[in-house]
Image: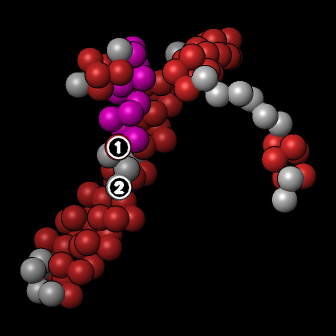
């Protein structure tokens, strides 16, 4: 679905999906609340905790396998330049050095 919406490569779309799966902290908070309110049994709570930890820990290796392993350094530069050109064309933003922003205050 991401590939269709963003018109990017399958590698990019898959990496977005992998990164969206890393919801570990929010899930742990929700699971603790569910356990305290007796909505979840301790056994179900443990299963969900293990699933949250496994999916969170497998994010970096999966992202490396899908996205980073096949890229060369020049690919990153060309994609960054494409993004900068898109931002400049869409928003007509002027690049201002950060030092000039702070001298006005």
Q: What is the crowding at mark 1: few (fewer than 14 residues within 10 Å), some, or many (at least 20)?
A: few
Count the marks: how many?
Answer: 2
Say which residue appears at 50% left-offset and 31% top-offset.
64
Q: Residue 84 carries which label?
A: none
Query: Above or below — where is 86 with respect to 27?
Result: above
From the viewer's perspective, tell me whether residue 76 is left or right of residue 86.
Answer: right
Residue 92 or residue 54, whichever sits in front: 92
**Point 33% across, 35% down: residue:** 17
Q: Quadrant of residue 52?
A: bottom left
**Which quadrant is the C terminus positioned in?**
bottom right
How many C-alpha atoms fall within 10 Å of the one at disc 2: few (<14), some, or many (≥20)? few
| CA–CA distance in space, label 1 to label 2 | 7 Å
Residue 44: image location, x then y, percent = 13, 71
Proximity of marks 1 and 2: CB atoms separated by less than 8 Å: yes
Q: Can residue 98 be seen in this view?
A: yes
Q: Which of 62 and 9 is in front in this view?
A: 9
Q: Is residue 63 above or below residue 57?
A: above
Residue at image mark 1: 20
Q: Quadrant of the N terminus?
A: top left
Q: Give the range drawn in magenta.
A: 8-19
Structure colour scheme:
secondary structure
Q: Which residue is disc 2 drawn over? A: 23
Q: Residue at x 19, y 82 (%)?
A: 35
Q: Is residue 40 left or right of residue 17?
A: left
Residue 59, compared with residue 34, is above or below; it is above
User: Is 17 within the magenta?
Assistant: yes
* Residue 72: in magenta span: no
Q: Is mark 1 on a helix, strand or loop?
A: helix
């Amino acid at each position: 679905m991401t590939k269709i919406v963003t018109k990017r490569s399958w590698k990019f779309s898959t990496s977005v999906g992998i990164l969206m799966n890393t919801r570990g902290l929010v899930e742990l908070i929700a699971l603790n609340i569910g356990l305290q309110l007796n909505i979840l049994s301790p056994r179900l709570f443990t299963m969900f905790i293990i699933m949250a930890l496994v999916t969170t820990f497998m994010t970096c290796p999966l992202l490396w396998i899908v996205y980073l392993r096949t890229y060369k350094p020049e690919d990153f530069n060309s994609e960054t330049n494409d993004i900068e050109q898109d931002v400049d064309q869409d928003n007509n933003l002027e690049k201002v050095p950060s030092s000039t922003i702070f001298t006005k205050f």
